[in-house]
Image (tube, rainbow, N blue to C red):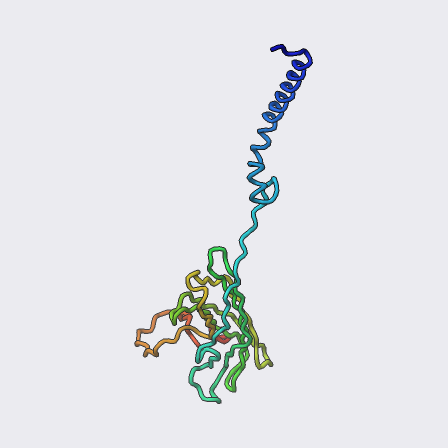
């Protein structure tokens, strides 16, 4: 069989084109390796490039209304005094809460509380100490407790004073995030009354410690 010159030239031309295509494909291989498999990306993402990952949307956080326990909405000083013997009374005002879901499924709770100090018939202007207690409960068990004290000053000639407090980042575990309670009150956890033990008088009187569950405001001039 005799191959004509024209056929041989055509075969050589086709070979050269194929060789050039192979060289171009090999030259473009590194760029393709950086972006991943073009055909795989096309089937997965509808294009030749991988789109940036989107953050997972968090579900809304459960945020129950604030519960005020019995006896936690007001405190009188001294406790149990008659109307004529009351020096001051502290009462809760507006209460607000905010709940934020975290990436791990837990919840961060923020609580804001307002309170008012009102002078009684036996009261006088001065500085008063208002104790707040914020608790997270689940199945009637306390999970977290925060106790804070805020000073209120009632000036001369005034009958009342106001204060507010914000407690941030109170944690609720993920396992309890669907069923928990927010409890806010004045004072601390109730304790059974105890009779103080007699003690010797010290040469120098020491300042009494300030218990977190005390219900009596500290008036100006009483400290130090």
Of all residues shown, which one is farthest toward the front?
A: 1
Picture layout, residue 185 above or below residue 5: below
Q: Which of the pair 85/61 is nearer the observer?
A: 61
On the image, which quarter does residue 51 sit in? top right
What residue is drawn where x is 49% and y is 76%?
Answer: 219
Q: Could you tell me residue 2's position as x and y percent? A: 62, 10
On the image, which quarter does residue 4 sit in? top right
Of all residues shown, which one is farthest toward the right?
A: 6
The quarter of the image holding the N terminus is top right
Q: Which of the pair 11/56 is nearer the observer?
A: 11
What residue is drawn where x is 45% and y is 66%?
Answer: 178
Please tell me how many numbered marks the rendered image carries. 0
Q: Could you tell me residue 32's position as x and y percent? A: 58, 32
Q: Which of the pair 141/72 is nearer the observer?
A: 141
Q: Could you tell me residue 215's position as x and y percent? A: 44, 76
Residue 224 visible in image: no
**For residue 186, side relative to residue 159 (left or right):** left
On the image, which quarter does residue 125 sit in? bottom right
Residue 183 visible in image: yes
**For residue 38, side relative to residue 211 (left or right):** right
Q: Could you tell me residue 121's position as x and y percent? A: 52, 87
**For residue 188, side relative to residue 8 (left or right):** left
């Amino acid at each position: 069989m005799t191959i004509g010159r024209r056929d041989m030239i055509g075969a050589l031309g086709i070979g050269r084109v194929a060789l050039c295509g192979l060289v171009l494909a090999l030259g473009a291989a590194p760029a393709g390796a950086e972006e991943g498999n073009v055909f795989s990306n096309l089937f997965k993402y509808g294009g030749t490039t991988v789109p940036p990952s989107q953050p997972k949307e968090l579900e809304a956080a459960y945020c129950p209304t604030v519960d005020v326990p019995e006896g936690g909405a007001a405190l009188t000083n001294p406790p149990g005094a008659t109307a004529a013997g009351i020096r001051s009374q502290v009462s809760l005002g507006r209460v607000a809460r905010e709940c934020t879901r975290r990436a791990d499924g837990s919840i961060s709770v923020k609580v804001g509380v307002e309170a008012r100090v009102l002078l009684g018939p036996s009261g006088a202007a001065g500085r008063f100490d208002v104790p707040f207690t914020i608790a997270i409960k689940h199945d009637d068990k306390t999970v977290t407790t925060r106790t804070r004290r805020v000073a209120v000053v009632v000036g001369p000639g005034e009958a009342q004073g106001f204060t507010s407090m914000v407690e941030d980042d109170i944690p609720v575990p993920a396992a309890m995030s669907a069923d928990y309670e927010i409890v806010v009150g004045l004072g601390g956890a109730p304790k059974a009354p105890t009779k103080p033990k007699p003690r010797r008088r010290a040469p120098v009187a020491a300042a009494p410690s300030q218990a977190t569950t005390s219900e009596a405001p500290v008036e100006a001039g009483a400290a130090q």
